[in-house]
Amino acid sequence: MERNVDALLTAYHRSGDESARDQALVELMPLVRALALRYAGRGEPLEDLVQVGSIGLIKAVDRFDVDRGVEFSSYAVPTIVGEIRRHFRDKAWAMHVPRRLKELSVRLSRLLDELTNQLGRSPTVPELACAAGVEEEDVVDALDSAQAYSTRSLHAPFDDDGDESLGDRLGVEERGYEEVEDGSLVSAGLGMLDARERRIVELRFFEEMTQSQIAAELGISQMHVSRLLRRALGLMRGRIEELQEETND
């Protein structure tokens, strides 16, 4: 099947063959169902998870670059799993929040990461509002509504004194093991990148250069650096999530 799918994807991306795209989606549905089964029994109907995973598959097929020399499954699995995980995340609210604010809160969460990388600091409310194309009041409401989400950070204060976090009450882990594990995950993520993307990530996070400095170093525009960095981090994040899911299973 893999060889047939590769041929179909090549026909779609190089010749614009829509029928090849449709056939590839049909042949790849067993992969979606297999990934959806990992999350069965967690409060969501399996068919709903398959539908959500199908959205991830469509995104993967449409965005896949057949000339990168990367196996499609290595690209598709993190994309499909990411859609399913977002489905659970978006539904995991402890109290009712208007859908508009819930969706905006999710968008702002992504924008916070992107703008923090671009600006080298946390963005202001006006900057978030501009990036999201909404009013500042809506940003404030959406950020407040995030408090209704059901999870709680291990770094949150355990009591009113704020001297001790929940993580402190749960014991202390040996940092050396965590650093080795994180290093292994980062290396795996870097393995998904081409030479230029890898160099940009190394300059930004290992050598702590700004995006403008990276642009000067590589002879490209800062906007191009920003786009390449976002793409690289997305590929790395997808690969790391895939590995973490395999470990959890």
Image (cartoon, rainbow, N blue to C red):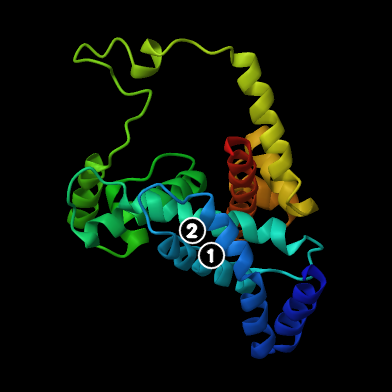
In the drawing, does residue 141 fall left or right of residue 56? left
Q: Amino acid at mark 1?
A: Gly
Q: Nearer the viewer, residue 94 or 144?
A: 94
In the drawing, does residue 162 fall left or right of residue 86? left
Residue in the picture at 68% in, 37% down: 186
* Mark 2 residue element: helix
Where's the N terminus, which quadrant? bottom right
Residue in the picture at 51% in, 63% down: 53
- Within-10-Å neighbours for mark 1: few <14, some 14–19, many 20+: many
Residue in the picture at 52% in, 68% down: 54
Q: Amino acid at mark 2?
A: Glu
Q: Percent position (x, y) of residue 124?
A: 32, 45
Q: Are marks 1 and 2 in contact (CB under 8 Å)?
A: yes
Q: Percent position (x, y) of residue 5?
A: 75, 74
Relative vertical location of residue 20 with respect to residue 164 in this rendering, above or below? below
Real-space Cα distance between discs 1 and 2?
6 Å
* Mark 1 residue element: helix
In the drawing, does residue 37 fall left or right of residue 189? left
Q: Which residue is mark 2?
A: 83
Q: Which residue is mark 1?
A: 56
Relative vertical location of residue 237 with respect to residue 179 in this rendering, above or below? below
Q: Percent position (x, y) of residue 206?
A: 68, 33
Q: Which mark is residue 42?
A: none
